[in-house]
Amino acid sequence: MVSVICPTCFEEFEVSPPALSELPAEWDYDCEVCCRPMVIAFDFDGDEEEEDGGIFAEARGLGA
């Protein structure tokens, strides 16, 4: 799981990231707290042998 902070309500929640072979990726997603739409960008930073350890996510509102 990867932590994401909603750009609207600033609450933190976790999502399952895509497979390493699919990175980088962007998903349209609704906040699990306030239900506002956002885009979550996933990327990999580090050694490919680390499972979720190197995957990070950043959320942005649709207006940004």
Image (tube, rainbow, N blue to C red):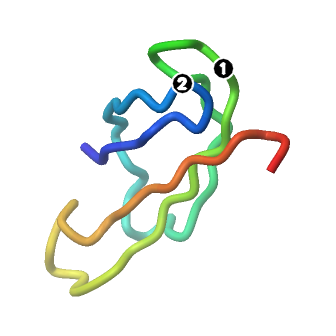
Residue furthest toward the bottom?
47
Location of residue 23 with respect to 1 vertically, above or below: below
Q: Secondary structure at mark 2?
A: loop
Left-right relation of 51 to 41: left
Q: Position of residue 9 (x, y in %)?
A: 54, 24
Residue furthest toward the top?
34
Location of residue 37 with respect to 2 vertically, above or below: above
Q: Of the residues under marks 2 and 1, which one precedes in the sequence?
A: 2
Q: Position of residue 51 (x, y in %)?
A: 17, 65
Left-right relation of 38 to 44: right
Residue on which the image places disc 2: 9
Badge 1: residue crowd in 10 Å (few <14, some 14–19, many ≥20): some
> Residue at 46% across / 69% down in the picture?
43
Residue on which the image places disc 1: 36
Q: Secondary structure at mark 1?
A: loop
Left-right relation of 39 to 11: right
Q: Position of residue 6 (x, y in %)?
A: 51, 34
Q: Position of residue 42 (x, y in %)?
A: 49, 60
Write down the quadrant of residue 15 in the picture.
Answer: top left
> Residue at 61% across / 29% down in the picture?
8
Write down the quadrant of residue 3 in the picture.
Answer: top left
> Residue at 14% across / 74% down in the picture?
50
Q: CA distance from mark 2 to mark 1?
A: 9 Å
Circle 2: residue type: Cys
| Residue placed most toward the observer, 60 or 55 | 60
> Residue at 15% across / 80% down in the picture?
49
Circle 1: residue type: Arg
Q: Are marks 2 and 1 in contact (CB under 8 Å)?
A: yes
